[in-house]
Amino acid sequence: MEGLLTQPFLTALLFGAVTAGVPLLLAGLGEQISEKAGVLNIGIEGMMLFGAYTGFVAAYYTGSFTLGFIGGGIGGAVVALIVMLLCIRFGLNQIVIGIAVTIGFEGLTALLHYFQFSRTYPRLDAAPLLAIPGLSAIPVIGPGLFNHNAVVYLAVTLVGVFTWMFRSTYVGLNLEAAGNKPAALDAAGVSVIKTRAMAVLSTGFLAGLGGAYLANVGAGLFVPMMTGGAGFIGIVLAMLARGKPVWVLLGAALFGCSLSMTTALQVAGVNVPTDVVQMLPFAMVMLVLVIFARHSVLPPALGLPYVRGDRG
Amino acid sequence: MSAEAETLPGQLPGGDKLKEIGAHIARVLIPVLLALIMGGIILLILGKDPLAYYGYVAKRGLLTWGGLQETFTRMAPLLLIGAGLIVAFRAGIWNLGGDGQFLLAAVITSATAPVLVGTLPDIIVLPLCMLLSIATGALWSVIPALLKARYGINEIITSMMMSFLGTSFANVLIKLLFWDPATTVPQTRTLPVEDRLPRLGDSTVHSGILIALAVIILVHLMMTRTAFGLKLQVVGANPAAAIHAGLNVSWLTIATFAISAGLIGLGGSVEILGVFGTVRADWNPAYGLLVVPLVFLARFNGFGTIGFVFFFSALMIGGDSAARRIGVPNHFVLVLVALLLIFLAVVEYLDHIRRKKAR
């Protein structure tokens, strides 16, 4: 077991934690925006998966990772457009449509992949890394945390941006009002529908970007159903974060570590069945929920369509 | 999306009744047709002939005796899952953790049945395994139920998390505890064919379908005709009112979850006792979410669910062989299910607007 504490092992552990955590962070941040605005976005899994697919295809055919990430974000936003139209514009049941979107894009991406690549799974080249000068030279932590793809830094920066946006801008205030007291927002002359629509589209873009990162950087390929519940973990992160982006970051780091830890243990020769590895993040979610159950907070108008003039 | 509006009978004068029944049928048929048409368009885009696909699916799933028997066999687990969902949905609880409950119950069944058949007669073993599987399913729902009952934590997320956990845990159980030493691929011991659920007459359909039909009808009657069912419906329709009416909502939530998950577990058990006799690692038919739209289409009505499960089973059986024959992976069925859900919601919305205007 002493071999576990060597420098390369710890570096790999940190590096893996970041790689595994970033898709969750993006999904969690995205979901947080929706939830703030009063939309329970169960379809985020479908958005991630479609983003993973479009992101992979874009990167595969253009050879550009940047275009891949943009493609992923747009893919996620396209799915969000469906949710926006059905749930926000028409006020259909958010849970039903969310399930439909998740199942539907599981099926659709698997179909598209089959018709395009048959049963092969082509790989992308390794994603470009951006070492932060100075910091990346620190032993262990440097190569583990400060030598990643640019999307990682973007995601972490977003945490700061969103914190500022929620706290000190009208956009943040409107979002919060749309989830807490939509009628008040309406009375103040701001469209609830538009506010929520923008929130859902942003969620879609972020989830899609997370999916593209998962496929293009994390795995280097696209496999049907590859998100495997990452979107749902994102929902849990948003639920537990109580509207604070920093907590999403901490949660994502925690889950990233647990994912990376088990993979690293296997590499180090500790014999754990892969199924135990797969259980870990979900067991962690349940554990966190059980412990912090009373602290998770959701806006009062969550999941309810806004109809002007309805009481409530 | 609520059933209450439809379950209040006798509000309309007799003349409008026929019209109302017509509207009912239209509300159900239109989403199905739209989903099939939209699915056909997707097939066209992918370069496949939709008519050939649907024709083949119908022929294989409905019009050949062999296919029809497979369809009936497939109905058994789906009906039991449907029964479980009806209980939960009518009580306003989203038990979306069906896959984990189903699989764990299946694993427990396949771990116990082959061991017990040597010592006890089949007539005791089979029901015993079913009871065990019901308990297993129910047990797997306890955490989401408690979190919902005590802290009001959204059960959609927690039941799904437990489902992911359960599907992996089922594999762990097979690999670490119940691995049949005689096999190289991890799987449980196999229940001999002669000890499985007896078949109906000369057919290949096992008697699990009778259990499933009986259960779903009983569930329907329980929800619509008994005081307990009525209590659950009140909780589902308006939890605040239920509290004011003196109902113990926490307890009813836990009971609902247990019954729902127990029935879904029974579905897993019946599938093993009737069809497979063993569970292989990584086996996961993922029926849980697929039955959701069927139950919605049937408006949480047990008899309606039987009809839709029949239709859907034929689609699945036909789709499976179309995957090999026509080269459309059966993931297409997922797309159809999603379209069905979306069009169902849209039609319901339009209908809602029509009624509002009529008033």
Image (cartoon, rainbow, N blue to C red):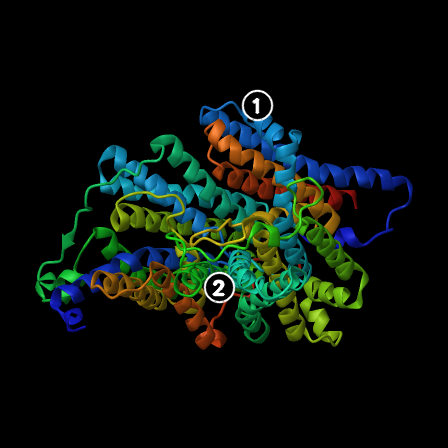
Q: Secondary structure at mark 2?
A: helix
Find residue A70 and report its horizontal and vertical position in percent. Answer: 30, 42
Choose top left, top right, bottom left or bottom right for residue A302: bottom right
Please tell me which residue is depicted at 41% across the width and 57% down the height of the picture.
Answer: A171
Find residue A113 and report its horizontal and vertical position in percent. Answer: 38, 36
Mark 1–mark 2 Cα distance, whole angstroms, equals 40 Å
Choose top left, top right, bottom left or bottom right for residue B346: top right
* Viewer-side residue, A280 vs A196: A280
Please tell me which residue is depicted at 29% across the width and 58% down the height of the picture.
Answer: A20
**From this viewpoint, which residue is outermost toward the front?**
B118
Identify residue for label 1. B51
Q: Secondary structure at mark 1?
A: helix
Q: Few, some or many C-alpha atoms within 10 Å of disc 1 (few <14, some 14-19, many ≥20)? A: few
User: Could you tell me the amino acid type at mark 1?
Assistant: Leu
* Viewer-side residue, B130 vs B117: B117
User: Could you tell me the amino acid type at mark 2?
Assistant: Met
Report the side of B266 relative to B218 (left or right): left
In the image, is residue B304 above or below residue A168? above
Q: Is disc 2 on the same chain as disc 1?
A: yes
In the image, is residue B46 above or below residue B7? above
**From this viewpoint, which residue is outermost toward the right?**
B14
Task: Return the chain for callout 1.
Answer: B
Find residue A300 and report its horizontal and vertical position in percent. Answer: 55, 66
Report the side of A49 relative to B22 (left or right): left
Identify residue for label 2. B162
Report the side of B136 relative to A77 (left or right): right
Please tell me which residue is depicted at 20% across the width and 46% down the height of the picture.
Answer: A127
